[in-house]
Amino acid sequence: MRVAYVNADPGVPVFGNKGCSVHLQEVLRAMVLTGYEVELFTRRTGGVAPHDLSTVRVNPLTPLAQVEAGARELAALDANEELERLLALGAFNLVYERYSLWSYAGMEFAQRVGIPGILEVNAPLIEEHAAYRGLENRDRAEQVAKRVFSAAKVIVAVSSEVASYVSPFPQTAGKVAVVPNGINPDRFPESVAPTLPSAAGVFTIGFVGSLKPWHGLDVLAQAFEEFHRQQRESRLIIVGDGPERPKLENHFSASGLANNVVFTAAVLPAEVPGLLASMDVAVAPYPKLEPFYFSPLKVYEYMAAGLPVVASRIGQIAEMVDHQLTGWLTPPGDPGALVEAFRTLRALPELRKRMGQAARARVLKNHTWTQSIRRIFDLAFAQPPLPHAVTN
């Protein structure tokens, strides 16, 4: 089977190290491992393909000019002509596209030639861009959404909240399936040497991800400051980079904790397992966000690494993590609750071990990328199409 994978979003570097990049690479990898021949059409490569993805043929789409926002949005709309022309040069059995604000050519091409079109929706992009990045041509973005939802055969939402976002569009009726993110077991073998081993007796708390305001890192900083005051033999590892880093560094410097916090900056996906092996617990301290639409890749990877997860009880996380069985759930935005979780888990190493083992077993059984891709492709070739919205 030949698959055209479309990524027209200039903000998603396929072979980079952002969370969206890891997600895209793992979906590609699952397709290859399942036996599909994949051809990639992408606005941004972001680096060189890993060796195990070298069989994926890459068709670069013309980069968008660095012009003012409104003109750039319209240029992205015009770029659909190029994508359609390139797709028409190949013979495909299926088109799989990561939804982006201005791209509709992939799904409309699939519909026109009579092959399944799968649209993967990771976020309410129109609302997200309007709130965080600015959106000059919102009406045009809404028109694109209607076109692409109408043309797709299956719309894959990564969370129930994303499904709730797309479902009011009448063009999505009977097409929506919730398939959460997953993990690649090969990246997380049982025994991985820690990249940053700690001294004996030091309790290590860790976070992996982009340092953005919606990740709750200010709450984590407050919690670690208080926890370290109570437990001097402790440290914090922050893996990633982003706009919140200067604020965090200033906080820890002012608190006298600079020597107890390690910032690694952004790392390649291959480096993450060794860094997770350097932690005793891993944190996803999201604040109270409405709606919370994420399917947090970091939480799946924490669990795959056999770590107990300390995470906010919000959205899909509350479904993923069983409190005191595979992790520890806390109220969003509550540094005191994080401190209590850290204190309890530090005092009970056997509980940490049981939680980590149970978390790993759960994601290996139910949440691998190959399982997700097989399910999605089964939906794409189902006859008749989905009779109603499907949830995980």
Image (tube, rainbow, N blue to C red):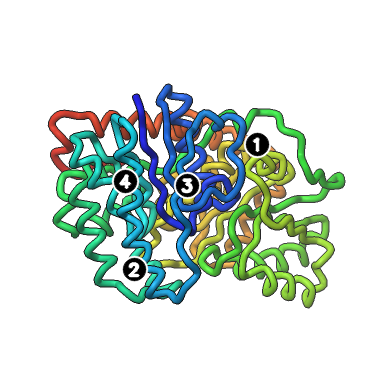
The reply, left or right, for residue 302 in relation to residue 287 is: right
* Residue in the picture at 84% in, 63% down: 259
Instruction: Work out whether residue 291 or residue 335 is closer to the camera in this orientation and state it.
Output: 291
Q: How many marks?
A: 4
- Residue at the location (30% across, 53% down)? 81
Pick whichever, 356 or 215, lies toward us: 215
Inspect the image, locate mark 1, and give the three-letter code of the amino acid beneath it.
Lys
Q: Who comes first in sequence, dot 2 or dot 1?
A: 2
Q: Looking at the image, is mark 3 or mark 2 earlier in the sequence?
A: 3
Q: Is residue 355 visible?
A: no
Report the residue marked by disc 1: 353
Quadrant position of the N terminus in the picture: top left
Residue pictured at 57% horizontal, 50% vertical? 46
Find the distance from the CA under tag 3 to the CA under tag 2: 19 Å
Mark sitting earlier along the chain (1/3): 3
Residue assigned mark 2: 74
**What x and y, as percent, mark residue 58?**
48, 39
Chain-order first, disc 1 or disc 4: 4
| Side of 322 relative to 177 (left or right) | right
Q: Which mark is residue 60?
A: 3
Q: Residues within 10 Å of mark 3 (few under 14, many from 20)?
A: some
Q: Say which of marks 1 and 3 sits in front.
A: 3
Q: Secondary structure at mark 3?
A: strand
* Viewport quadrant of the C terminus: top left
Amino acid type of the residue that numbered disc 4 sits on in the rendered structure:
Arg
Query: What residue would you read off at disc 4?
Result: 85
| Sequence order check, earlier mark of 4 and 2 | 2
Alpha carbon of mark 1 to alpha carbon of mark 3: how far? 45 Å
